[in-house]
Image (cartoon, coloured by chain):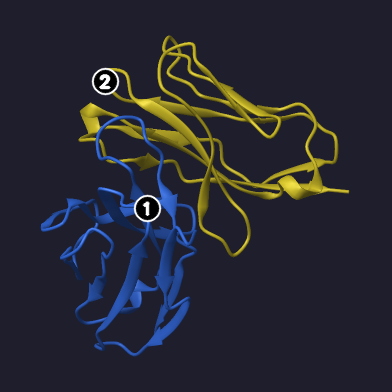
Chain colours: A yellow, B blue
Amino acid sequence: GNSVTQMEGPVTLSEEAFLTINCTYTATGYPSLFWYVQYPGEGLQLLLKATKADDKGSNKGFEATYRKETTSFHLEKGSVQVSDSAVYFCALKGESGGFKTIFGAGTRLFVKA
Amino acid sequence: NAGVTQTPKFQVLKTGQSMTLQCAQDMNHEYMSWYRQDPGMGLRLIHYSVGAGITDQGEVPNGYNVSRSTTEDFPLRLLSAAPSQTSVYFCASSYSFTGNTEAFFGQGTRLTVV
């Protein structure tokens, strides 16, 4: 069945450092891929998405590219801020999974001033 | 624009008690779902609904019931609470079940079963 694997956290960075959070997936066909962010005490909210191979999703300085050949959707940001401290979830949704959204385990990011 | 509203935000139950977690959305979304979030396990799907009157089981349905009598509401019932049901519960909705539409989440209900 469909699955999503994320790098384990926590990830601790200094402000203005470069961020990469790895995400790989298993699915047949062409699922849509998402990154969600969860700030402390809140629900998840969409950060960005990509719906077909080679698409790049971007928002708030974050970006991720849908790589069909490596089944990956890594999240990157060139310069993180303290306000980016949160838990980040990679997710997929596709026909092979009955269109149910499957989430990774989440990666907690701490950014120090 | 309220989005997805969950109540209560916090709840403590004794083992064996029952309760209902409420979820309402005002976006006329077709698809609604319930997840539980546990440390290191991400979000696991409990039940979902593709429209009023239609529900189905997700990955971890045991001990939970749902119904969808209206488009707006999708309550989750715990029949006889157990300590293993201590978790944070999230309700989510999407414009459609198929396709690439994203999920909108409520703020969550933190449930402790003692």
Tell me, for residue A102, which label it has, or none.
none
Front in this rendered view, residue B9 or B35: B9
Residue B45 point in image, percent of width and height: 30, 52
Q: Are marks 1 and 2 on the same chain?
A: no
Taking the spot 57% from the left edge, 41% from the top edge, the residue there is A8
Question: Tag 1: residue type?
Answer: Met
Taking the spot 46% from the left edge, 26% from the top edge, the residue there is A24
**B6 left or right of A88 in image:** left
Q: Is residue B64 above or below residue A72?
A: below
Residue A110 point in image, percent of width and height: 73, 49
Q: Residues within 10 Å of mark 1 (few under 14, many from 20)?
A: some
Q: Is residue A13 above or below residue A25?
A: below
Residue, far right = A113
Q: Which of the two discs, 1 and 2, sits closer to the camera?
A: 1
Taking the spot 23% from the left edge, 74% from the top edge, the residue there is B77
Residue B96 point in image, percent of width and height: 28, 40
Q: Chain of mark 1?
A: B
Residue, far left = B53
**A105 left or right of B45 in image:** right
The residue to which callout 2 is attached is A28
Q: Chain of mark 2?
A: A
Front in this rendered view, residue B82 or A97: A97
Residue B110 point in image, percent of width and height: 46, 73
Helix, strand or loop at disc 2? loop
Front in this rendered view, residue B81 or A84: A84
The residue to which callout 1 is attached is B27
Q: Quadrant of residue A51?
A: top left
Distance from the alpha carbon under mark 1 to that under mark 2: 31 Å
* Picture mark count: 2
Helix, strand or loop at disc 1? loop
Question: Tag 2: residue type?
Answer: Thr
